[in-house]
């Protein structure tokens, strides 16, 4: 059965088998796969199976969809193709694609891994494996300042985005080893324990203080 691997900031957030004729993506809750990101349209795109072929189709989204770096409206997919929707990267693997192919294709694409040119391509940083976050442990964000002070938000989704669009938006992603925070958009970059978060995801620990768009928050594990 064909399947897709969904990742955000090089962290795999979901693997989905394409068992239906149509699998829809979008921000609205009625989609088969909900993407909680302001850059994703309500009804953004879908995978469509016709016989033994799989097609990817953009549904007139605001920010568009890309396959292997090219904007598309509709395209037949081959195993290994990379679909991009906003910050999400989706690897398509055809029916029967081996597990070793899946491992190679995860994360950011790299040109031939240096095989054709003889040059060495820097290896991607591996996902931390030193610890596994128990499934019954859930993260939350407690607001410490502003009008929402005292409010606590449970991080029930694989990826939670927060902030003010155009000003400062960050995402918190649950990985097998714990939670990481990442700057998504806006000039106002988030801070973790007073340190500005750059382009790479930063691991969060219980009790860490998080600041975004002038609002102070605390990350908690329970």
Image (cartoon, rainbow, N blue to C red):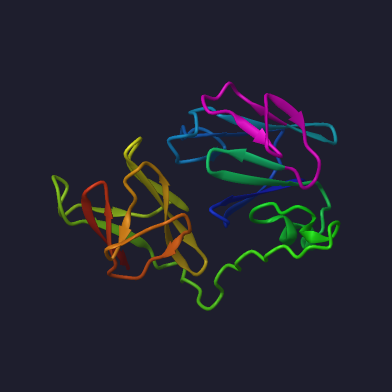
The location of residue 159, given as percent across then percent down, is 45, 51
The location of residue 82, given as percent across then percent down, is 70, 43
Quadrant containing the C terminus in the rendered view:
bottom left
Q: Residue at x 46, y 71 (%)?
A: 134
The location of residue 7, given as percent across then percent down, is 58, 51
In the drawing, does residue 125 fall left or right of residue 152? right
Q: Residue at x 24, y 57 (%)?
A: 217
Task: Identify the residue at the far top of this view.
Answer: 60
In the drawing, does residue 142 fall left or right of residue 171? left
Nearest the viewer among 80 and 189 is: 189
| Residue 186 counted in the magenta span | no
Quarter location, residue 137:
bottom left
Height in image: 90 above or below 104? Answer: above
Task: Identify the residue at the far bottom of this view.
Answer: 130
Nearest the viewer among 49 and 111 is: 111
Height in image: 60 above or below 151? Answer: above
Quarter location, residue 67:
top right
Quarter location, residue 68:
top right
The location of residue 57, given as percent across then percent down, is 68, 27
Q: What stretch is highlighted in magenta?
A: 56-81
Nearest the viewer among 85 and 190 is: 190
| Residue 64 counted in the magenta span | yes
Nearest the viewer among 168 and 45 is: 168
């Amino acid at each position: 059965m064909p399947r897709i691997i969904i990742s955000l900031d090089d962290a795999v957030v979901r693997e989905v088998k394409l068992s239906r004729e149509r699998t829809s993506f979008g921000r609205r809750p009625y989609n088969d796969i909900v993407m909680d990101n302001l850059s994703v349209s309500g009804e953004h795109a879908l995978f469509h199976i016709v016989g033994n072929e799989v097609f990817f189709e953009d549904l007139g989204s605001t920010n568009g969809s890309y396959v292997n770096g090219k904007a598309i409206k509709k395209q037949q997919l081959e195993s290994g193709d990379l679909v991009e929707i906003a910050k999400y990267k989706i690897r398509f693997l055809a029916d029967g694609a081996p597990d070793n192919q899946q491992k190679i294709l995860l994360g950011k694409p790299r040109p031939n891994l240096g095989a054709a040119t003889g040059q060495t391509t820097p290896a991607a940083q591996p996902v931390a494996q030193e610890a596994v976050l128990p499934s019954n442990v859930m993260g939350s964000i407690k607001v410490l300042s502003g009008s929402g002070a005292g409010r606590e938000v449970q991080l029930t989704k694989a990826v939670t985005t927060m902030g003010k669009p155009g000003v400062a938006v960050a995402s918190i992603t649950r990985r097998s080893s714990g939670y990481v925070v990442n700057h998504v958009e806006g000039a106002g970059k988030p801070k973790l324990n007073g340190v500005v978060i750059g382009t790479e995801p930063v691991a969060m620990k219980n009790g860490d203080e998080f600041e975004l768009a002038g609002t102070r928050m605390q990350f908690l594990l329970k």
